[in-house]
Image (cartoon, grey):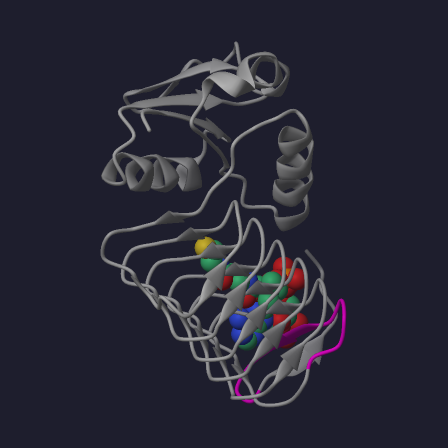
């Protein structure tokens, strides 16, 4: 296990690259659609765009998508899996992930995050720095749990939803698909598909951005 390709030369990509290195990958190659205008991300090299990666994907032991946008991340992962890319899970060495939890491919668990027993996490999810997912939670594909966000036991989060930094979700609450929970919110009731909520307790708003 030596060669890792990362699509998305962003700040998030830097974090993914370091976690890959900590997991023993010796060669990290970045790909980004800003190539060839951009050739470098810190000390890492950007060696091609998505098409370049598609043409050499089977040379890599691990392919990872480092794109923050949930919908684009999952769409790129599907495209690269169909092209034969080897996807896996990346876990920072300081994270605590229960042996009784299940994490699907393309998901990253960052530093100091905790995933407790019988939690299920789908494909291409981001469990960001110091986020926690308690027992029996079900987190669907393409979800982003931002730094310091907390899901209590038995919470369900639908596909492509984004839980903002420092938000907390009460036990057994269901969050729909493509929902957004604002930074610092306390979610105490179920959230519908496509709804954005903010505040303590969290209430719906219409998104401007
Ligand atoms: C919820 C969120 C997505 C809304 O973004 P937006 O649609 O651009 O909304 P706006 O910034 O225009 O704010 C709309 C209203 O909601 C309020 N609001 C926005 N986010 C809020 C939050 N987290 N808590 C409380 N109120 C919030 C604004 O003050 C504004 O109120 P007003 O209409 O009275 O002026 C965004 O504010 C947020 O919290 N994002 C999460 C960021 C994050 O977690 N980053 C981590 C990345 S790893």
Residue 61 versus residue 131 in the image, above or below = above
**Front residue of this view, candidates 20 and 170:** 20
Report the number of numbered marks: 0
| The image quadrant in which ligand 1 is located | bottom right
Question: The N terminus lies in which quarter of the figure?
Answer: top left
Place of residue 147 in the rendered image (x, y in percent of width and height, measured from the top left)? 39, 62
Q: Which residue is drawn at 71% across and 64% down?
A: 207
95 shown above or below 115? above
State which quarter of the image contains the C terminus. bottom right
Which residue is at 54% across, 19% downward? 57
Q: Where is residue 46 in the image (x, y as percent from the top left)?
A: 43, 17
| x 65%, y 35%: residue | 76
Judge left or right: residue 68 versus residue 196: left
In the rendered structure, which segment of residues is drawn in magenta?
191-201
Question: Quick one: 61 or 52, which is closer to the camera?
Answer: 61
Residue 144 or residue 60, whichever sits in front: 60
- Would you place residue 26 above or below residue 99 in this image? above
Q: Is residue 50 left or right of residue 22?
A: right
Whether 78 is drawn above or below 117: the answer is above
Q: Does the magenta stretch include residue 200?
A: yes
- Left or right: 198 in relation to 6: right
Magenta span has 91?
A: no
Residue 48 image position (x, y, % from top left): 52, 13
């Amino acid at each position: 296990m030596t060669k890792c390709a990362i699509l998305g030369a962003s700040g998030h990509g830097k974090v993914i690259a370091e976690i890959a290195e900590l997991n023993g990958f010796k060669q990290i190659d970045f790909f980004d659609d800003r190539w060839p205008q951009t050739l470098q991300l810190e000390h890492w090299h950007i060696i091609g765009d998505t098409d370049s990666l598609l043409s050499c994907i089977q040379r890599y032991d691990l392919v990872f998508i480092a794109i923050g946008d949930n919908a684009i991340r999952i769409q790129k992962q599907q495209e690269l899996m169909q092209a034969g890319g080897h996807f896996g899970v990346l876990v920072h060495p300081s994270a605590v992930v229960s042996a009784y939890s299940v994490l699907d491919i393309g998901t990253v668990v960052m530093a100091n995050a905790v995933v407790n027993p019988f939690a299920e996490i789908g494909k291409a999810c981001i469990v960001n720095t110091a986020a926690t997912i308690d027992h029996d939670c079900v987190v669907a594909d393409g979800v982003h749990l931002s730094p310091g966000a907390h899901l209590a036991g038995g919470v369900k989060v639908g596909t492509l939803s984004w839980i903002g930094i420092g938000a907390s979700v009460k036990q057994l609450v269901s969050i729909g698909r493509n929902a957004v929970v604002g930074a610092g919110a306390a979610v105490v009731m179920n959230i519908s598909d496509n709804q954005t909520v903010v505040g303590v307790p969290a209430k719906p708003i219409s998104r401007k951005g």
